[in-house]
Amino acid sequence: MRGPELRGAETAGPAGDGTWMPDMSQVVGRDDLLLVTLDTLRFDVAAELAGAGRLPNLAAHLPGGRWEERHAPGSFTYASHQAMFAGFLPTPAAPGPHPRLFAARFEGSESTADRTYVFDAPDLVSGLADAGYRTVCIGGVGFFNKRGALGSVLPGMFQESHWEPEFGVASPTSFEAQVARAERVVAELPAGQRLFLFVNVPSLHHPNWFHLPGATREAGDSRATHAAALEYVDRHIGRLFAAASSRRRCFTIVCSDHGTAYGDDGWTGHRLGHESVWTVPYAHFFLEPGAH
């Protein structure tokens, strides 16, 4: 594994499935934490762009410069995030069991390992709050907009949550607006306060046609506009990484919650059981102070 992202026997060890994972019992309480979900991002598009050098800011932090192929815990945003907030992050796309980074204390769990951070709470967010973290959500898609009961469930897990129309799926500058809010959140925190920052990035979600020059609303979204949306995110994610690591080292997870189909085998959209939906990109790494 490349660079300083995972280093030292005290912070990284074999997960037992060919991947490496840090000792989360040491990470939690010491480092800040950042979870970024690139909502609806397909694995194949993410892998192609990284391999072609079209994601320079993300690829600089991906272990080996590559995304890890994983399986999503749900086929749409609400289900997948409920699972992730319970500690069930996307699972390596190979036979398991696979040790998890986070797990609620649960008798008989086969994926809780020595390096897993185990919490005594119904969800990871409240478990981290119990450990002294300030938990902050910066929402994107409608399940985080707090405009009704359903859109309040996921952000309601956090001590502090943010959503504005400028953060939503209809905004061509949604991620820039989210990053600006993240910068403000970090700047206002006391220096000694540990932070768990969650950002749900809506840019890959429908509609995304406006991220590709020359594309039109009438033609709609496509695999190409999906790719252009990821390039848009890459252009601005360095600011988010810099903010998250501005106070101390930050353990970071960047992944998709599910993919989406663009006519694959006749399928369109998500909340369905197709490889384009259940196969997602994933990476975790450390951001050293001053990362960008």
Image (cartoon, helix red, strand yellow):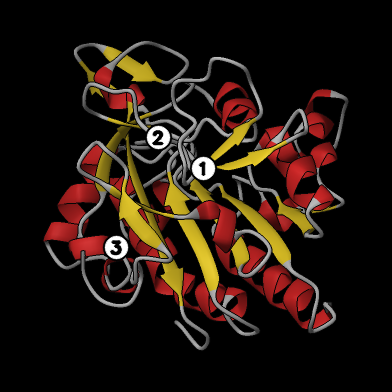
What x and y, as percent, mark residue 11? 42, 64
- Say left or right for 42 vs 142: left
Crowdedness near tag 2: few (<14), some (14–19) or many (≥20) residues, C-alpha within 10 Å: many
Q: Are marks 2 and 1 in contact (CB under 8 Å)?
A: yes
Of residue 69 and residue 113, the one placed in the foreground of this image is 113
Q: Secondary structure at mark 1?
A: loop
**Residue 242, visible in the rendered structure:** yes
Image quadrant where residue 176 sits: bottom right
* Position in image of residue 202 (x %, y %): 55, 47
Q: Amino acid at mark 2?
A: Pro
The first of marks 3 and 1 along the sequence is 3
The disc labelled 1 sits on which kind of residue? Thr
Q: Residue at x 46, y 83 (%)?
A: 291
Q: Give the mark nearer the N terminus: 3 vs 2.
A: 3
| Quadrant including the N terminus | bottom left
Residue at image mark 1: 116
Measured as percent of width and height from the top left, residue 273 is found at 35, 11
Mark 3 surroundings: few (<14), some (14-19) or many (≥20) residues within 10 A = many
- Mark 3, residue position: 62
Q: Residue lying farthest bottom?
A: 290
Dot 2 or dot 1, earlier in sequence: 2
| Residue holding disc 2 | 99
Quarter of the view holding residue 143 = top right
Q: CA distance from mark 3 to mark 2?
A: 20 Å
